[in-house]
Amino acid sequence: MNHDSPLTPEGELVLNTMLGTMKIKGALTDEMISQEEGEIILGKPFVEWPSELQQKLAPYGASPAIR
């Protein structure tokens, strides 16, 4: 667990599951997620992500459970 994470342990688990799903589906790429978006994903809970990013990643499991 990353002790510097702004997320709860449960939120980190959901985030890691989402990232794993993206990797398996071949969607975890620089074309899919920019460096800026990656920083947002790793640094903020889902509710603080821009709505476009929330919508883009929802098919991979992004949800308010990333808290």
Image (spheres, rainbow, N blue to C red):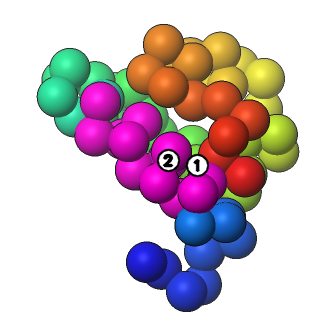
User: Which mark is nearer the camera, 2 or 1?
Assistant: 2
Where's residue 15, x and y in %? 49, 47
Position of residue 32 relative to residue 12, above or below, is: above
Q: Which residue is mark 2?
A: 15
Q: Quadrant of residue 37?
A: top right
Q: Which residue is mark 1?
A: 41
Amino acid under disc 1: Ile
Amino acid under disc 2: Leu
Query: Which residues are drawn in magenta?
Result: 10-21
Q: Secondary structure at mark 1?
A: helix
Where's residue 8, x and y in %? 67, 66
Q: CA distance from mark 2 to mark 1?
A: 8 Å
Indicate the quadrant containing the N terminus: top left, top right, bottom left or bottom right: bottom left
Q: Count residues near mark 1 (Cα–Cα under 10 Å), then give few for <14, some for 14-19, many for 20+.
A: many
| Camera sees residue 64 | yes
Instruction: Classify residue 8 as left or right of residue 56.
Output: right
Q: Magenta region, mostly helix, strand or loop?
A: helix
